[in-house]
Image (cartoon, rainbow, N blue to C red):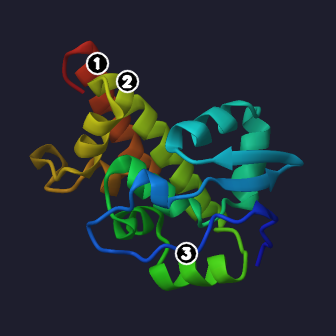
Amino acid sequence: MKQLKLVTSAGPALPNRGNVTPSKAAIHPVVVDFLGINISVGSIQQFQDSMRAFSSPNRRILIKKGFPPQLVPVFARDLLVSQDEIEAAIGLPKTTRKRYQDNQLLMNEVQSERLMRIAEIETLASEAFGSKEKAGHWMSSRLNTLSGESPLQYLDTEEGAMHIRRTLSAIVHGGGF
């Protein structure tokens, strides 16, 4: 397992409360040493901004190294979904996330890449809908055009993510996909 060098604590592990997401005050920023740079992440936007500071090859290294599981509650809060939904979208069972947190381990590269994908799509959806709240609502809504699944559920594969990108592009630019 990969060890996480946690610069400061993200606070105690938050209990998963089903569909109830913690308030902004309940989540402490996660400060992690990535490639010698301390990154404080208290929101998906801060995560995206931090990742943009790295070149594509370095982002690949970060993904392969893994992200801290303490980001799950941050993403859940910002997307207005439960931690269960984020865990399902990235393929991280709750018990595994707890073990990773308790032992200060990083998520694997598949889980980390899926988390990065969620952040990318959240940014695109926020731009398309004009607000993070509307984007979060859309990402968690079950849509007939997605066979009753939510856009968040589609992000478990790159093929699904490409479909969501095309959908958002059609929303922004008009036309079909």
Inspect the image, locate mark 3, and give the three-letter code of the amino acid beneath it. Answer: Ala
Inspect the image, locate mark 2, and give the three-letter code of the amino acid beneath it. Answer: Glu
**Residue at the image position 33 percent from the left and 52 percent from the top:** 152
**Total numbered labels placed on residues in the image:** 3
Hey, which residue is sitting farthest right in the picture? Answer: 36
SS assignment at label 1: helix
**Residue highlighted by disc 2:** 127
**Residue highlighted by disc 1:** 172
Tag nearer the camera, 1 or 3? 3
SS assignment at label 3: loop
Inspect the image, locate mark 1, and give the three-letter code of the amino acid beneath it. Answer: Val
Toward which corner of the image does residue 145 lie, by quadrant? top left
User: Is 125 rendered above or below residue 19?
Assistant: above
Crowd rating for badge 3 (residues with CA inside 10 Å; few <14, some 14–19, many 20+): some
- Quick check: can you spot residue 156? no
Of 30 and 157, which appears nearest the observer? 30
Contact, mark 1 vs mark 3 (Cβ under 8 Å):
no
User: Is 92 rendered above or below residue 164?
Assistant: below
Of the numbered discs 1 and 3, the one sitting upstream in the chain is 3
For the residues marked 1 and 3, what is the alpha-carbon distance in whole angstroms? 38 Å
For the residues marked 3 and 2, what is the alpha-carbon distance in whole angstroms? 31 Å
In x, y percent, where is residue 82?
33, 64
Of the numbered discs 2 and 1, the one sitting upstream in the chain is 2
Tag nearer the camera, 3 or 2? 3
Contact, mark 2 vs mark 1 (Cβ under 8 Å):
yes
- Quick check: can you spot residue 41? yes
**Residue highlighted by disc 3:** 13
Toward which corner of the image does residue 102 lie, by quadrant? bottom right
